[in-house]
Image (cartoon, coloured by chain):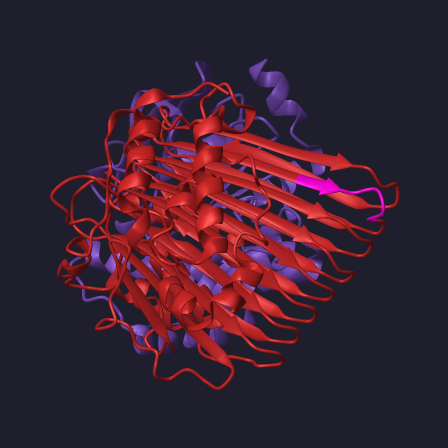
Amino acid sequence: MLEIKNLHVSVEGKEILKGIDLSINAGETHAIMGPNGSGKSTLSYTIAGRDGYDITEGEIIYKGKGLTEMEPEERAAEGVFLGFQYPVEIPGVPNTTFLKEALNAVRRYNGEDELDAMEFIKLVRQKTKELGIADDMLKRAVNVGFSGGEKKRNEILQMAILNPALAILDETDSGLDIDALKVVSDGVNALRSPDRATLVITHYQRLLEHIVPDHVHVLAHGRIQRSGGKELALELEEKGYAEFQEAAA
Amino acid sequence: MQTTEGPIDGFLADFEATAPGLPGHGLSWMDALRKEGIERLRDLGLPTAKVEDWKYTRLRPLEDTRYRPVTEADGTASVDQLPSLLESAGARIVFVNGCLRADLSSLDALPEGVVVESLADAMRRDADWVEGYLGRIAEREHHPLMALNTALMNSGAIVHVKKNVRVEAPIEIVFVAGLTDAPVAYHPRNLIVMDEGSDATLIKHHAGAGVGAYFANTVTEIHVGDNARLRDYRIQTENLEATHLASQHVRVGRDGTFETFGLAAGGRLCRTETYVRLEGAGAHAGLNGAYLMKGREHCDNTTLVEHLVPHTTCREVFKGVLDDESRGVFQGKIVVHKDAQKTDGQMLSKTLLLSDKAEMDAKPELEIYADDVKCAHGATTGQLDTTALFYLRSRGIPDALARNLLVQSFVAEALDEISHEAVREALTHMVVHRLPAQCYLSEEWTRENAAE
C-alpha cells in the first residue's frame, strides 16, 4: 500500500527527515512513536502533501504511484487521509457543507456521481450513528466551539465518510481525556479493515492500548531507530526515549 | 481647498442648462436650496487628496471624464434583467439612468400608511412635506459632492412610513445605469422618513447594465423616529466603468434602530459614506458591509457615528476581500460627545488580501469626550490561512473551491450582522457567486446556501 524509500525532507531549509524507510501493507496498522521534535508530524504532512515540506531525496510510493507530484486534494481523492493533531476551525461554513463538498469532490475525481442532498444526509446519518456522534455537530460551523474530543470525533467522521485506503492519524490522543480517547479509538478500530492501512503517530503508549498496532517504529532525529511488534511500545513506556536520543546523538 | 478646474466648470454649466427642468423647479425654497448647493460647490471645488477625508480615494474619473447630465432618452434604455434579491419582494421603484420607470416599478401592493414615490412626484404631490425634511437631515455643508447633489438632484425616491406602521415585505429601490452613448451623470436624492414606532426594510440596488461609463452621485437622507426601526440593505454591482459615490445621512431618535449592510461587488471607483447621529437615548446603529473587489477596482467605506446623548450604541463590522490590484479603504470614526455617558461603540474592519498587489488602507478612530463609555475598534489585514487551506484540500476539496469556502467563511462574520433572515441568506448566496476567484462551485452548494 505505502512504500517510503530513503525519504529526506527539509522545512525552511532545515533537514528534518534524514532517510526514512517504511513499508505498510493493506490491513496493517503501524505506529510511529517518538519524542517531540523527532519529525513525526513532518512525516505525516509530507505524505499528505502540505506546502513547505520539501522532499530533497527519496520517494513515496502509494498503490504503485508516486505521491510526491500530486496536489493534496489529489492524494485525498486517491485515498490518503490525514487526521489532524489540531483540526482547523472554519467559521461560517457548516460542517455538513464541508463534508459534502469533500465527498463529492473525491467522487468527481474518481468518476463517480455526486451524492445529492438526500443521499448525502442518509450516508452521514448512518455514519454518525455507527460512531456515536451527535447530529448537532453537523449543523455547526466546522470545528468552531468544538471541545477537543468533538474535534477528534469530527476527524473520525470525515474519515468514515471519505473511506480512505490509507489513514494517517497524527497525535490523535493529544488533548483527550480517557473517555474521549476511548470513543475516538473505538471509531478508528471500527474502521479497520483488510483493505485499509492505518498509520498511528503518537508520543505516548496509552493510545496503543486502545488501537493495537501490528508494527511499532521508533522515530528519533529524523530516522527510524528501531522497529518491532506491539511489545516495543511497552518497552518504550518503561524506558522512555533516552536510549534513542543518545544513540543518534 | 484646491479647485479642480474642468469638472467643476462642467457641472456649473450643467446647472445653468438643466435647472429649469429639475424636480421642484419654481418652488422658492427648492430653487434657493439648489442655488446654495451650486454656490457651495463653486467655493469648495471637488475633493482632492490634500483633504484628509479623501487622502486614499482620488476622484480621477471626475478629473478626466466629462459626464453629461442624463436625459429622458437615457431613461428609456431597454433593461433585460432587473437586479432582484428576494423572489417575494413587496413594492419596488425602478430608475434607469436616473429616470423613473413606472413600467418596471410595482407600487400597487403598498400597505396603508406607506408612501413610495419618486422625489419629483413627491414634490408635485406634497412639496410642504418634502420641504420639512429635504436638506435638513443631512448637515454636511462642507461636503462638495453633497453640494453637487443638492444643486443637480434629478432622481431618487422618497419612502415615508407613517406612525406605528410596520411594513412586512421589503421595499426595493432599484437604480440601473449604463447603456448610454456617452458618459452620463445622475444625482439621486433619496429621502427615507420613518415616523415614530414604524418598521420597514429597504433593499437598494445600484446596478450597472452592460457597458458605458457613468457617475452616480447619490445622497440619501434618513430619519428614524422614536421607537422606529429601519433595516437598510444596499447591493452595489455597478459596471467596470462606473463611478459610484454615495453618502447616507441618518438621524436616529429615542429607542430607534438603524441597521444597514452594504455589499459592494463592482465599480471602477466606489465610495460609500455613512453619517449617523444618535439623538435619543436607546438609539442604536448597526453599520456593516462586505466588499469583494478585483481588477483595479477601488472601494471606500467611510463612516461617522456621533453619540450625542447617554445610552446609545453602535456596532460596525466591515469585511473586505481584495484580489488582483484592487484597493480598499476603511475610514471609521466614532465620536462620543460630552454628555453621551454609557455609550457602547464597537467598530471592526477586517480585510483579506488575495493578491500581493492588492492594497488596504484602514483608519479607525475614536473621539471620546465622555468618561463612562465602552468603545473599541480593531482593524486587521491578512491573507488566507494556509493551514486552513491545507486542511480543506487534504479532504479532497480542490484548491479554488477551498479558497472560496475560506473567503465565504471570512465574510460570514459581517453577513451574520444582518437581522433579516431572508436577506442574509440571499446576500450569502450572492457573495458565493461573486467571489473574486472565479472558480468551480458545485450547483448544489450555492443552491443549498440560498435555501438554508
Is residue B269 left or right of B332 when viewed as pictured? left
Q: Which residues are magenta?
A: B334-340
In the rendered image, residue A44, in percent from the top left (x then y), is placed at 44, 37
Per the rendering, the colour in which chain A appears is: purple
Q: Is residue B42 above or below residue B90?
A: above
In the rendered image, residue B50, in percent from the top left (x then y), is placed at 50, 18
In the picture, one chain is red; tell me its letter.
B
In the rendered image, residue B258, in percent from the top left (x then y), is placed at 60, 61
Q: Which is more toward the observer, B376 or B301?
A: B301
Q: Which is more toward the observer, A96 or B164?
A: B164
In this view of the protein, can residue B394 be seen by the observer?
Answer: no
Quarter-of-image position of residue B80: bottom left
Quarter-of-image position of residue A127: bottom left
Is residue B1 left or right of B182 when viewed as pictured? right
In the rendered image, residue B11, in percent from the top left (x then y), is placed at 32, 35
Q: Residue at (53%, 68%) from the top-left corner? A: B129
Q: Is residue A145 magenta?
A: no
Q: Is residue A35 above or below residue B98?
A: above
In this view of the protein, can residue B181 be seen by the observer?
Answer: yes
Is residue B57 left or right of B238 when viewed as pictured? right
Furthest toward the right, the residue is B371
